[in-house]
Amino acid sequence: MSNRIINHGFTSFILVVWMGINIFLFVWFYFFYDLGEQFYYTRHLLGSALAWARAPAAVLNFNCLLILLPVCRNLLSLIRGSFMCCGRTVRKQLDKNISFHKLVAYMIGLMTAVHMIAHLLNVEWYNNSRRGNYDGLSTALSNLADTTNTTYLNPIRTLAISAQQTPTYFVFTTIAGLTGIIITLALIIIITSSMEVIRRSYFEVFWYTHHLFIIFYAGLVFHGAGRIVRSQQTTVPPHNTTLCKDRFEEWGRIPECPIPQFAGGFPQTWMWVIGPMILYICERLLRFIRYTQTVTYRKIVIRPSKVLELQLVKDGFKMDVGQYVFLNCPAISQLEWHPFTMTSAPEEDFFSIHIRSAGDWTDKLIGMLEHLPEGAQGPKMGVDGPFGTASEDVFDYEVAMLVGAGIGVTPFASILKSIWYKFKDSDPKLHTRKIYFYWLCRETHAFEWFADLLQVLEKEMEERGMGNFLTYKLYLTGWDQSHATHAMVHFDKETDVVTGLKQKTQYGRPNWDKEFEEVRKENPTSVVGTFLCGPQVLAKVLEKKCAKYSDVDPRKTKFYFNKENF
């Protein structure tokens, strides 16, 4: 439990606060509508479904306020920069923005279902009351109409349509009903197309359907304008429900029981969402401005492993280690933006990215650049960013464990390059004293573009007498018999047959218990930052190991887990 608190304490606190606010809003508004005197006659028509419809609406307002904020990338980068003076625990929460975005979306989906079911029941009960299927009071309340002296309570005003068709007619001809259908359909499409299997295999479907949020928010703003739920208004003389509920035939005839007056509540949803909507519009405007800025190609390299290296130049572009950018190629799609971690160092006068063939968009881009004449500029490229990630904090730790899987090595390429420049320039601000680097790949070709950098680092560390500063281990997780035989024959060579490095490539996967135990023994009093850019399965393993091998004693080794999220 203590180790879990070290790694997840603040995250759990934020989730408890968020859930607490949701519960408070639900309970408060539930009892507001279930016990409020002004809703006595409304409850008589609808029963507890009134409170069950309105309480989720309050929770929906709160979460619709929140859901846009985690995807305002520029806002998060600004906050991250403002919190550089704060502890790493606070900044780590910003790296979980997508997870929080999903969590809020689940809450919106759940509350929408409850809200919708309750209102479907409300429409049915409104219809039955209007047709006199219930008691005399329900009939009297439903017969009230908008005149010079009266106001209606039951929004179903016509009896010209059959009882079976009235609910459908009401839903499709009122502002609340029509916008409710639009909102619900948009939300269903957004949520279903966001499933992992669709997002990974058909990213374009996910990307385009996610923009239905524009329709969702437009419908949300106008949804309350229908003012379907109405409450009793104060009259002179006052209408006492306790006295008059059983004397509805005398309403307006005796001074003690004037005809009750009703009005719909003022729409409030727009007040909840207007702030985040303005922030998001500013976000998109900033992205558009960045999109219009010219980007030139400095170098285009296509590696044998179908990895595309782009070196790009953009005026005024400044980056930090481990950051990422979003790329847009109008020749492929005007709307699609895809995230890529930069592999260059802040000290370089360009920024580079490595793109693996992993879908329609990347395949089309690689295909276009493969056939370019040497020295030619590629297609127009829009760049949005850079944006901060967990890897930015790597130099805040005295000891760092970097774990990359496949193309997930990209943020660590930036870090290791920056380290090389810092050593070259004898940067006194470099406080990190030890780095452990692990790279897991399925095929040998994946190592080739990164091996050159490691060779330079090997040589640099040896010349400076700091051979122990960087410990790196490369793991090949996929191989055939011929490769294994070749490796065995050349086992005695000083350099590795795969990478040409002095550190030999290992076959299989790391024994993480052994690795963490070794790091803990070598650094008995250090704070170790564990950084991963790789699959979720590996993230769960490393997260558990960080908790397992962190010591409760503040004077001993502690592991903090950090993962790249896009």
Image (cartoon, grey):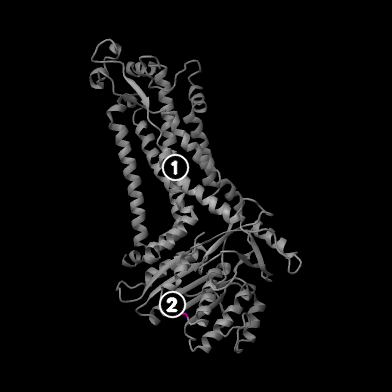
Q: Indicate the position of residue 469 as horizontal and vertical percent values.
A: 47, 82
Residue in the foreground of this view, choosing between 451 and 419: 419
Asked if residue 200 can be seen in this view, the reply is no
Circle 2 residue? 429
Q: Residues within 10 Å of mark 1 (few under 14, many from 20)?
A: some
Counting from the top left corner in percent of width and height, residue 157 is at 45, 19
Disc nearer the start of the sequence (2/1): 1
Residue toward you, 272 or 206: 272
Identified at 73% across, 66% down, the residue is 376
**Helix, strand or loop for disc 2:** loop
Q: CA distance from mark 2 to mark 1?
A: 43 Å
Asked whether residue 6 is drawn in magenta, I would say: no
Label at residue 274: 1
Q: Main secondary structure of the magenta part?
A: loop
**Residue 486 appears in which quarter of the rendering?**
bottom right
Quarter containing the N terminus? bottom left
State how many labels appear: 2
Residue drawn 51% across and 69% down?
A: 321
Q: Which residues are magenta?
A: 427-432
Q: Kindly identify the amino acid type of the residue bearing the numbered disc 2.
A: Lys
